[in-house]
């Protein structure tokens, strides 16, 4: 080995030793937790507290800010830069050399553990094959198609909710995205501005209050929920109110974006937001050492998915695009859509056929993903430059289309918990009984979901009747804890047509003549009745 070779190796070692690494530092505790919990308005708004109380969700240490003394000590440590913080995960996102970061653990006893974004440094590094870098956004726009948004709303029966007066009024939606260029000037958002429906926002990337900058991606996403052009375009929740947060840096793909998303979600929670829409996902990065693999898509590994799970536990509905990698080498759902309690949305076209770009599941631990589907191929948005309707492709748009209807649906049932709302949506979907890796549970029917919850509300005092099996094939049976002769059974189609009536509930009831589908079973007893949705296979 010659001298020049030795010099080159020495230079390479030197560069590696001083290169900047990303890492998360997790703390052991929050010393002032009791004081904060005793004074909840120091950490959460009244609206956020009301949302918790309504759903019987207690405050806990995760709601308490990161300890300021811990923060300052890490910030002032030699060679360390603090880039973000998370109260939910009690962690800081930092940069520094490997040695500077590693030394923190021995220097500060309040540090629980450190996780490097670089998998070769991480203690529990995984060695499965790294996927190919995917594009930042998969979005194409046809600028000359000036149709309307009717199909994408009616596919979900969102128009049914609108007709009943549920248009998102009183509901708050946070959009966490890459920028909202021209949303403050386009006529399509004039209705939002005139009615003060844009409540505020923040640019976490630039640490500024200017969120009407950066990418136009968030503008298109916002239009699918809140855009309005009389006679041409209506978003799925036109009367909802919005917070607009920028967490995505379109110039690069770095782990910091995960931490900024968690900061934004924490802010949304503290403000009392009901629904969060995120048309973002993370799998691979500019630095391949930071890349995730399919084995990381378990909803528990990535920083952003861990944050999303906590966000859901605070009582919000988190809606997230499943990803646009269905026809790429990655194929699978990204983070945070892999999180168990995130409502992950795939894409179909106008005829309800799955879009080939729509990422699919299952998660590595075998859970169904996507959860549901909405139109994301040739979906309509408001073009950020021209201000007119245009078509766009991507699960980036199926997610907000769905999120807006979710807000309208929750408006109809304000006393239901976030879990009850999400479960009703899944159960209303057309493949609920036969989910698969591409379609998940399928396309929700919010008219059916509303009927289901309405029926469940009317049955609170009539619980002694059980119909089984459900789903059923040829016959159904009844369990009644008293004389069955006092009961009458009727079966209706969802359109209200009576298909069967009997007072003999002691025998099996044949339903083989009914086509596969969903029916309303009504049990009457004296002046009471109970309605049950029956699935016929």
Image (cartoon, helix red, strand yellow):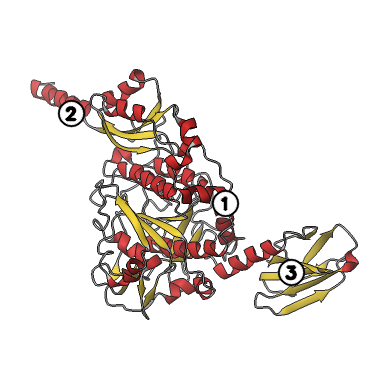
Tag 2–tag 1 contact (CB < 8 Å): no
What is the x, y in percent for residue 529?
77, 68
Q: Is residue 438 or residue 489 the one in the foreground?
A: 489
- Kindly check if marks 2 and 3 are in contact, taking CB atoms under 8 A apart as contact: no
Which residue corresponds to mark 2? 15
Given residues 510 and 321, the one toward you in this image is 321
Upstream in the sequence, badge 1 or badge 3? 1
Residue at mark 1 to residue at mark 3: CA–CA distance: 31 Å
Of residue 198 and residue 441, the one placed in the foreground of this image is 198
Residue furthest left in the image? 4
Give how far apart the Cα atoms at labels 2 and 1 are: 55 Å
| Picture coordinates of residue 508, whole percent (x, y) | 84, 66
Determine which quarter of the picture holds residue 382.
bottom left
Asked whether residue 342 appears in the rendered view, the answer is yes
For label 3, the SS is strand
Quarter that holds the C terminus? bottom right
Query: Badge 2 local density, few (<14 within 10 Å), some, or many (20+)?
Result: few
- Residue 43 in view of the camera: no
- The residue carrying pointer 1 sits among few (fewer than 14), some (14 to 19) or many (20 or more) residues within 10 Å by Cα, namely few
Q: Nearer the viewer, mark 2 or mark 3?
A: 3
Instruction: Please state the horizontal and vertical placement of residue 312, each as a whole percent of the image.
Output: 49, 48
Q: Nearer the viewer, mark 2 or mark 1?
A: 1
Q: Which residue is mark 3?
A: 521
Quadrant location of the N terminus?
top left
Q: Earlier in the sequence, mark 2 or mark 1?
A: 2
Residue beneath the point at 35% across and 20% down: 108
Left or right: where does residue 138 sit relative to residue 371? left
Label 3 neighbour load within 10 Å: few <14, some 14-19, many 20+: many
Determine which residue is flagged by label 1. 54
Question: Which tag, 2 or 3, sits closer to the chain's start?
Answer: 2
Q: Are marks 1 and 3 in contact (CB under 8 Å)?
A: no
């Amino acid at each position: 080995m010659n001298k020049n070779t030795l010099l080159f190796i020495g230079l390479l070692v030197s560069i590696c030793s001083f290169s900047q690494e990303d890492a998360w530092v997790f703390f052991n505790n929050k010393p002032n937790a009791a004081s904060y919990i005793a004074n909840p308005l120091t950490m959460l708004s009244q609206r956020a507290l009301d949302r918790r109380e309504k759903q019987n969700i207690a405050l806990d240490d995760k709601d308490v800010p990161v300890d300021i003394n811990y923060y300052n000590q890490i910030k002032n440590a030699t060679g360390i830069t603090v880039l973000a913080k998370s109260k939910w995960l009690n962690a800081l996102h930092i940069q520094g050399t490997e040695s500077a970061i590693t030394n923190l653990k021995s220097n500060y006893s309040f540090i629980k553990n450190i996780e490097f974004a670089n998998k070769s440094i991480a203690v529990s590094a995984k060695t499965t094959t790294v996927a190919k870098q995917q594009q930042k956004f998969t979005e194409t726009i046809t600028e000359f198609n000036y149709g309307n948004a009717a199909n994408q709303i009616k596919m979900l029966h969102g128009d049914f909710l609108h007709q009943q007066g549920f248009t998102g009024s009183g509901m708050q939606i946070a959009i966490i995205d890459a920028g909202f260029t021209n949303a403050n000037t386009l006529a399509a958002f004039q209705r939002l501005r005139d009615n003060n429906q844009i409540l505020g926002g923040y640019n976490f990337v630039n640490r500024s209050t200017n969120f009407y900058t950066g990418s136009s991606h968030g503008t298109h996403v916002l239009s699918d929920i809140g855009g309005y052009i009389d006679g041409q375009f209506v978003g799925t929740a036109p009367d909802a109110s919005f917070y607009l947060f920028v967490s995505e840096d379109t110039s690069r793909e770095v782990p910091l974006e995960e931490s900024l998303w968690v900061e934004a979600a924490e802010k949304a929670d503290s403000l009392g937001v009901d629904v969060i829409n995120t048309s973002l996902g993370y799998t691979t990065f500019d630095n391949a050492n930071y890349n995730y693999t399919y084995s990381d898509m378990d909803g528990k590994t990535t920083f952003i998915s861990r944050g999303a799970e906590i966000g859901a536990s605070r009582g919000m509905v988190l809606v997230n695009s499943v990803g646009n990698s269905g026809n790429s080498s990655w194929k699978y759902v990204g983070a945070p859509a892999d999180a168990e309690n995130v409502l992950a949305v795939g894409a179909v076209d106008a005829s309800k056929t799955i879009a080939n770009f729509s990422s699919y599941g299952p998660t590595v631990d075998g859970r169904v993903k996507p959860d549901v589907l909405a139109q994301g191929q040739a979906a309509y948005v408001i073009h950020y430059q021209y201000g007119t309707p245009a078509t766009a492709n991507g699960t980036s748009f199926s997610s907000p289309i769905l999120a807006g209807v979710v807000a309208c649906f929750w408006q109809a049932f304000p006393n239901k918990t976030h879990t009850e709302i999400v479960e009703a949506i899944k159960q209303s979907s057309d493949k609920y009984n036969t989910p698969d890796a591409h379609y998940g549970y399928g396309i929700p029917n919010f008219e059916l979901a509303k009927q289901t919850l309405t029926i469940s509300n009317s049955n609170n005092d009539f619980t002694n009747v059980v119909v089984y099996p459900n789903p059923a094939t040829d016959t159904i049976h009844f369990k009644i804890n008293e004389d069955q002769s006092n009961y009458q059974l009727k079966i209706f189609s969802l359109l209200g047509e009576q298909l069967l009536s009997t007072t003999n509930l002691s025998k099996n009831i044949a339903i083989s003549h009914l086509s596969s589908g969903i029916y309303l079973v009504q049990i009457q007893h004296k002046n009471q009745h109970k309605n049950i949705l029956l699935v016929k296979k």
